[in-house]
Amino acid sequence: MKCVRFVLSIFAAALLIAGCASAPKASAKEQTPEAQAKAPEWRTFRGKVTAIEKYGHAVTDIAFADMQKAGYEHGDIVTVRFDNGYTFSAPVVANYDVDKGAFLVRTNHAGGFIAACINYGKLNVTANVGVGSALTVSMKQKAGYREQYALRALSRTDKRSDYASDESFANFRSVSLGSIGKNILYRGSHPLKKGWARAPFVSMLMEKAKIKTVVDMSDSRNELTSYLDPSNPQYSAYYASLDKAGSVVCLSMNMDFTSDIFAAGIIGGLRFMIGRGGPYYLHCNEGKDRTGFIMILIELLMGASKEEAMRDYMQSYVDFYHVEKGSYKYNVIAKANFEPMYKAIVGSLPPAKGARAYLSANGMTDAEIEALIQRLR
């Protein structure tokens, strides 16, 4: 009897061991369909370049709405290949939500069609493409840039009621950092641009501040002339009077603040200011990038600290996009945008000395620099 019990015990143990040994195989079979599921076959979009924008961005005939229907979203990383073989991978973003010099596929500003861009660079030159160039856009990594995009993505509205004041809505403010005199230097967004809801508020605030001299960093003379047509809904009689008096300079500057052309525009604008009295108004389109650079330069020259210049630069993000001061997003934007501008101006020098060195290196004489300083006090 003991022998039978012993045999049965061995048999039961063997069954248990066999069952345990076979369990993973059964589980593996159950998981196989999910584990070996094929990755989605993403549609490849084919199109052509339909326009090269002023700053070198290549607008295409590929509609973002069609890409969305195929499952593409903001934050995906795609591969763009042109017919000349030039290829790059970049995130799909609404605006320019990447670092300086980085590639991006932009979905805003072109009537719903995507554009291949380099932030603060000229893609048409880099990729050697133009109107008519063929391209394909394919998925590289789904949601590969989603977290960064969520952090960088900014939104604003064209409703005055969504903003605390006319000044915040227009990104309009006076700057008196360092030894800059009170109510002598102003910055803000565009006062005339067609379709720009903020324009009437900017124009009104300019007149209230009794602006006498304008440095327009975004427009060519032809563009400004079209904006000064009385048929333009954003037409400003005050701005027109300033232009008629010869008090507006059009610099038509690009976005690459490391380029010689950009530096030449900066020097041209400052020389224009030297020859005319204030109050001065400096603007581009939104009043934060090109305007941001020239304001950092002026502020540092006039004795502002790096921290003070950074806070003024970031105020545009606080006003325009409701970015909370001191937040993680605030600090990320400051690091990505302000820091490269600051470094381009001062290098490793102290702020004021670095600003002066920048001006000297780009052709301003000591006498011109001193004249500018006196104008701003």
Image: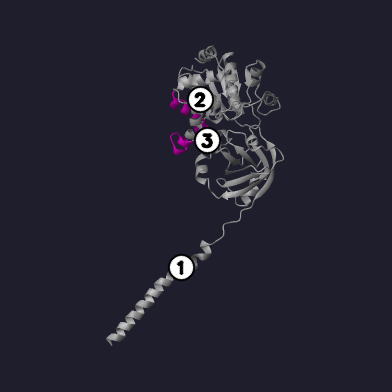
Q: Can the viewer see residue 41?
A: yes
Gap in angstroms between the C-alphas marked 3 and 2: 26 Å
Q: Position of residue 194 (x, y in %)?
A: 66, 30
Highlighted range, magenta? 304-332
Label 1, on which residue?
27
Q: Main secondary structure of the magenta part?
A: helix
At label 1, which amino acid type do we have? Ser
SS assignment at label 1: helix
SS assignment at label 2: helix
At label 3, which amino acid type do we have? Tyr
Residue at the location (53% across, 65% down)?
A: 33
138 or 159: nearer the viewer: 138
Q: Are marks 1 and 2 in contact (CB under 8 Å)?
A: no
Label 3, on which residue?
321
Query: Is 324 within the magenta?
Result: yes
Give whichever of discs 1 and 3 has the lower sequence position.
1
Q: Position of residue 228 (x, y in %)?
A: 68, 24
Label 2, on which residue?
345
At label 2, which amino acid type do we have? Ile
Residue at the location (57% across, 21% down)?
A: 281
SS assignment at label 3: helix
Question: Badge 2, how many Cα within 10 Å: few under 14, some, many 20+?
Answer: many
Query: Is 167 within the magenta?
Result: no
191 or 31: nearer the viewer: 31
Gap in angstroms between the C-alphas marked 1 and 3: 52 Å
Which of pointers 3 and 2 indicates the residue nearer the eye?
A: 2
